[in-house]
Amino acid sequence: MFKRFPLLVAMFLLFSFCRQEKPDIRAVCENSGGNHRIKWETFPPLKGTVSIYESDNPEIFNMQTPIATVDIDDGRKDLFAVRVLNRSYFKLVFNNKYSVITAERAVPMQQLANFRDFGGYYNEHNLQTRWGRLYRSPSLNNATAIDMKFMDALKIKTIIDLSAGRERFGKSRLYRANQIFNLPLRENPADVFFFSEKILSKQMRKNDVIISQQDNLAFVVEHNADYFEQLFDILAEKTNYPVVVSCDLGKDRTGVVAALILSALDVDKEQVVEDFLLSNQLIDYDFFLPDAGIYFSDIDVQETMTAMLSAHQEVIIYVLNHINKQYGSMSRFLENELKLNPHKKAKLKEILLYPRLY
């Protein structure tokens, strides 16, 4: 028996090697002077080559000819942007074996500066959220003719508008999709009005803004279970896609909705917070403050006004902690309050997550 021990050890080691986890691959696409900069990392580090394929459809790639093949060690590749009204999606194939899809998260619009894709996040099972299916946006009423052409190119089928009546009053809806669902999320009556006078008189400062936003979004979470349930019913139907979720600035109510969706897909808290804060890099303050001079002439007023238009880490973390405290956990909140049962959740994941690409 002992004579067979070395053979058994060798077989065990071979079996363990064969069962090693696939490498963890992360890739991002950034805008670099109007072109695309693709970056990647692998863990454990891979040696060899990565082939890059491009498409205007994240579901279909011509795998015959890559647009570039480089050493994995390079870690990046700059590519010329050739599409005007169609987005570019990139599939990276490492050593002809492991693959991942990436794209630029922000969609380049004229007056919808916070328009972006939910794709490219990873959940706890290392599954990636799909590109080109779900978008978030500020109010689509601000869309220019070019913005609308871009949305047509994205083949937007469904709009989920979170705006309340006060925001839609007096505005004509310029962009028409096949389906428009209005889910006017209820906000805290004490916090729904624009605090211009309080800001100009310095009765309201930056910390007051943050507390106000925390209270308001906690109120949104607690008082809109019916609308959130409708939202997930819409998202659980594959025929509704591509979908855009929007509100006035696309940062607060849309940010909460994004946090709920990403959490339902088992995306970790760190990426949920990252997604919420991305609005700060994209919102065009000049567009929302045409009379910015009256706010920016005083440094204290400027700080408060900027805080009003910004997304704050303290706010989204407060909301996530509030859900855990009030309902026990995010998963309990989703299932018990929003009726996102295991069957519906599985449908959502099937629609919004890639299967393993390798």
Image: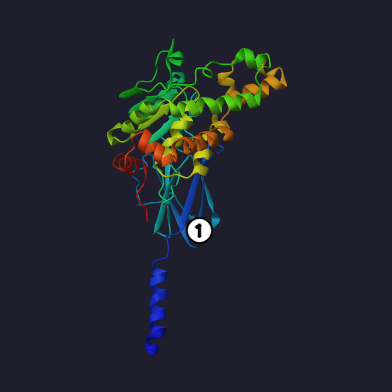
* Quarter where residue 89 is shown: top left
In the image, 165 versus 250, the foreground residue is 165
Image vertical order of residue 91 relative to residue 139, above or below:
below
In the rendered picture of this protein, how many numbered marks are placed on residues? 1
Quadrant where the N terminus sits is bottom left
Local crowd size for mark 1, using a 10 Å CA cut-off: few (<14), some (14–19), many (≥20): few
The residue tagged 1 is 43
User: Residue 158, position in %: x, y?
Assistant: 34, 27
The amino acid type of the residue labelled 1 equals Phe
User: Residue 196, position in %: x, y?
Assistant: 61, 14
* Quarter where residue 175 is shown: top left
Is label 1 in a helix, a strand or a loop? Answer: strand
User: Residue 116, position in %: x, y?
Assistant: 46, 33
The reply to whether residue 132 is in sight is no
In the image, 171 versus 151, the foreground residue is 171
* Quarter where residue 16 is shown: bottom left
Colouring: rainbow
Image vertical order of residue 65 relative to residue 116, above or below:
below
Residue displayed at 54% across by 31% down: 282
Position of residue 140 in the picture relative to residue 32 (left or right): left
The reply to whether residue 266 is in sight is yes
User: Residue 51, position in %: x, y?
Assistant: 44, 54
Residue displayed at 48% across by 62% down: 48
Image vertical order of residue 140 relative to residue 94, above or below:
above
Residue displayed at 32% across by 31% down: 234
Question: Which residue occupies the extreme top position in the image?
Answer: 170
Quadrant where the C terminus sits is bottom left
